[in-house]
Amino acid sequence: MAVLLIVVSMTACEKGLMTFDNQNADIYFYHAGQAPLASAKDSTYISFSYTQEQDSVIDIRIAVTGGKEDRDREYEIAVDTASTAISEVHFEPLPQKLTIKKGELSDVIKLRLLRTPEMETTSYILKLNL
């Protein structure tokens, strides 16, 4: 029985490993897949309660699957319609087209949140789509 199993396994079809060709590369929010205890950045809470600063800048890291490329890769980011935060009132407008530079696997978007008086009593949501 063991000999038969060995013979069958040696004659089984061989299939090479798939390689990633970057043709179907995907883009994602870098911290979105982390465990909940690892301070994930797929969502975050910003409070102006303990600061006198008028605004706050947060870094949003964007990454791609696959390998590095010898060309720039453009991507777009848009504010979701479910957002309650208003561009130019609660945050500075984001560029619609951004670029992951050649030879890089990620990019950082600097998002400036603007402190407004109504934030003392009202919470706002800013939802972004890639």
Image: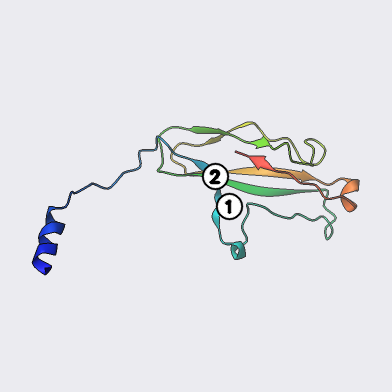
Image height check: is 130 above or below 37?
A: above
**Residue 11 location (% of width, % of height):** 12, 53
Q: Quadrant of residue 79?
A: top right
Q: Residue at x 79, y 35 (%)?
A: 88
Image height check: is 125 above or below 1?
A: above
**Residue 15 location (% of width, % of height):** 22, 47
Q: Nearer the viewer, residue 22 or 61?
A: 22
Q: Which quadrant is the C terminus positioned in?
A: top right
Q: Residue at x 67, y 52 (%)?
A: 43
Which residue matches tag 1?
Answer: 32
Q: Please, what secondary structure does the residue beneath circle 2 have?
A: strand
**Residue 68 location (% of width, % of height):** 41, 41
Badge 1: how crowded within 10 Å, few (<14), some, or many (20+)?
Answer: some
Mark 2 and mark 1: Cα distance apart in space: 8 Å
Residue 28: mark: 2
Q: Quadrant of residue 103?
A: top left
Q: Residue at x 66, y 32 (%)?
A: 95
Residue kind at label 2, given as amino acid type: Tyr
Query: Farthest front residue?
Result: 1
Query: Farthest bottom residue?
Result: 2
**Residue 52 location (% of width, % of height):** 85, 55
Q: Please, what secondary structure does the residue beneath circle 1 have?
A: helix
Q: Are marks 2 and 1 in contact (CB under 8 Å)?
A: yes
Q: Nearer the viewer, residue 53 or 121?
A: 121
- Residue 100 horizontal side relative to residue 89, left or right: left
- Residue 42 horizontal side relative to residue 1, left or right: right
Q: Which quadrant is the N terminus positioned in?
A: bottom left
Residue 87: mark: none
Residue kind at label 1, given as amino acid type: Ala
